[in-house]
Amino acid sequence: MNDFLAADNIYTVNCHTQLNSFDRKVLTTLYQPIIGHSATALYFTLWSEVEIDRIYSSPAYIKRLIKIMNIDLQSLVHCFNVLESLGLVQTLYRKNKESDFYHIKIFSPEQPSTFFQNPLLTSNLKNALDSEDYNKTKMFFALNETDETIYENISKKYQDVFSMNYDLRILNGKDTYKEYNYAKIASDVDFSLIKEALKNYNLQNLINESKVKKTIEMLLLTYPMTTNDIVESIVECSENNTIDLNELIKSIEMKDKIRKHKTELDLVYLRNDNATNKYEKNSVFDYLKKYCNSLKIDKDLLINLENIMKDYTMSNGVFNVLVEYVVKKNGTINLNYLKAIANSWNIDGINTVELALQRIDLINKNDNNNKRKNNYSKKKVIGNADDWYQIADKNEMSDEESKYIDSILSDLEKR
């Protein structure tokens, strides 16, 4: 319902389903604890409007509902919003010069068999009732099976009672008839995007299963997750082209808890889902887990990394480049070495992944040049006595070799 609803607006009601006494029990027992008595009363009021006029209600002013229910306009709008959110009603809007028109469509509540399979509805019902009342309510709709194996079926068949004469020509009519149309919680999940992303892992066929789609839909309605979060969890919970839906639910719940958990660690969990490179796309925590999985990642390490990122104002992308370099060079994370480079990069204004990668290339080239110089310095060179033998480190030679070199140099100096 929009926020422009006014008392002098006109509404009509259309029942898009067959409503019966069992639906009343479902609404009052299962839905009312979730939506409240005011929204339940609005549903039954709209239902009664249709019962009076059979299929469509006569046009009436919104102030009629306000008077019948004895509530204010703002409360009425809230009740409409609650009913719409669970798919019990659908509101269509039309504006012209004379007045605003609202056409309201009524749908049946979900049956108990589907209600208790819907995690959104059952979670809300559990929150509204205590554990004892929830179980009592559930048992109220439970089907008590009779052991039919001890009975004999003696029911008559159609042909035992009625004639087999019939006229197929009466089936040619094109009339349509009212059936049960149940309330559905609407969502705008784009499964084509999820399917496209899963092609990279050859798991796109999983989305063809209705149970998987329904679970994903409910998860995205329940938790503020991105498509990337869902795809990542599907990959983690899949094996042999099948998915464990219970593990998928646990994975998303854990992601949501981590996201909501307040901690001093903010920067190490930052990431950019829209980035095109692995450094910016992954948080520092995710990067360590994926690409430096030989490291022991504990809270102390994360706190130290968090502090370095804060002290030297480094983004997760730049910091991931730096961490990768340090781990490759030392096989571990030397925090002092990491700080020294972070300080240097901060002074030099290296604040993008591109600049960071260029600096790493430069460091690697310098390292290679130094290695060649060191190797060259250990070679014998023909020349004067001072250059005859260049020693990088005299301690690398044995005592005998050292004495031998000293004697040669002494003889050359005497000459």
Image: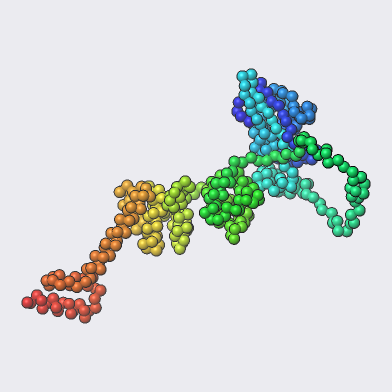
Q: In this view, does 397 lie above or below 73?
A: below
Q: How many marks?
A: 0
Residue 403 lies, in percent from the top left, at: 18, 79
- Coloring applied to the structure: rainbow
Residue 194 lies, in percent from the top left, at: 56, 48
> Closer to the camera, 260 or 273?
273
Q: Which residue is drawn at 12% across and 77% down?
A: 410
Residue 320 lies, in percent from the top left, at: 41, 53
Q: In this view, does 14 lie to the left or right of 245?
A: right
Q: Looking at this rendering, what residue extends furthest in the left direction? A: 415
Which quadrant of the structure image shows residue 42? top right
Residue 164 lies, in percent from the top left, at: 90, 46
Q: Is residue 195 left or right of residue 150?
A: left
Q: Which residue is drawn at 60% across and 53% down?
A: 205
> Closer to the camera, 266 or 187?
187
Q: Residue at x 66, y 24 (%)?
A: 101
